[in-house]
Amino acid sequence: MPDGKDARRPAGAVAPDAGTRSPVVAAKARVPPATALPRERLQGLLETVWTRRLGVVVAPAGSGKTTLLADFAARSGVPVAWYRAESWDAADVEDRSERRQRKLGSTRKREKTVVTLAKSLPVDRARPVCEIGSGWGVSLRHLLEGGFSRVVGIEPSRHRADVVRNALGVPVHTAAFESAETQRLLAEQGPFSIILSNHALEHTYDPGQVFAAASQLQREGDHLIVAVPNQETEQVMSALFRLYEFSSREAARACGASAASGATGAEAGDRQGA
């Protein structure tokens, strides 16, 4: 490709540096038709993927990987998300990252309740604050604007973490909050006057472990603010999106408070006496 063009690029797919946004080529997101002869041995091996969280098919070019996976998708009987990666996709990601960084610098999105609560607390705003599940960094930006000078994010998406680091100049860790690696890094930056999380706890494998990890990073009297889906008033979503739904009793139990104490969500998140 001496001229910098990829001959495999479908007609109409414009490169990001051409000054226009690349369209989504339908063929990249459509499962190809499965028209080849059955390959029982390989199909049998693929069936074992249901007992795993990740399966990888590796073979030389032209071996029929796409055809094999298309057949597997057709026979699976479950919804399938398909994406065919191309050589120019990395340029698209870089372009979107730059747009996200610019947007984060000017966004006027509504402030989350957990941030409003954090701003209302009588704490030293020179002390560090940590957000679990910082996403695109909007709440971190609101915290900075609220006078908190040392904010730290936890975000499993490396792409989002890079965007936030570049746009706000704050540390964002990508390992799980409760992991030994993250706990070590946070211990060097803490203790934290406030740890907050907005609709992220329901996506963790063990909420109790998250609370326990948070307690190791704070002093007596510091604050933990958590917003979670309310099982009693919200429509239950698919387990693909949430691992947990919380009632007030379950939320109290998860953070170690007595369900009979009548503590509100904000009080349950306060570490005084916890």
Image (spheres, rainbow, N blue to C red):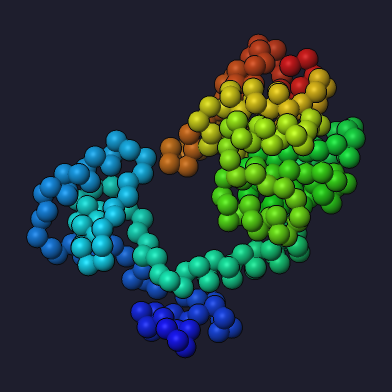
Q: Is residue 233 visible?
A: no
Q: How many marks?
A: 0
Q: 120 or 95, which lies in front?
A: 95
Give coordinates of residue 127: x percent, y percent. Answer: 85, 36
Give coordinates of residue 40: x percent, y percent. Answer: 11, 49
Left or right for 151, reference 156: right
Give me the residue at 65% from left, 68% from top: 98
Give me the residue at 81% from left, 20% from top: 220
Q: Is residue 52 visible?
A: yes
- Quarter of the image containing the C terminus? top right
Q: 124 or 166, which lies in front?
A: 166
Give me the residue at 89% from left, 40% from top: 126
Give coordinates of residue 234: x percent, y percent. Answer: 55, 36
Q: Quadrant of residue 162?
A: bottom right
Q: Is residue 267 above or below residue 92?
A: above
- Name the outermost residue toward the bottom: 3
Q: 147 or 90, which lies in front?
A: 90
Q: Is residue 270 above or below residue 55?
A: above
Q: Quadrant of residue 217?
A: top right
- Quarter of the image containing the N terminus? bottom left
Q: Is residue 56 above or below residue 243?
A: below
Give coordinates of residue 180: x percent, y percent. Answer: 60, 30
Left or right for 250, reference 32: right
Give me the residue at 66% from left, 12% from top: 258
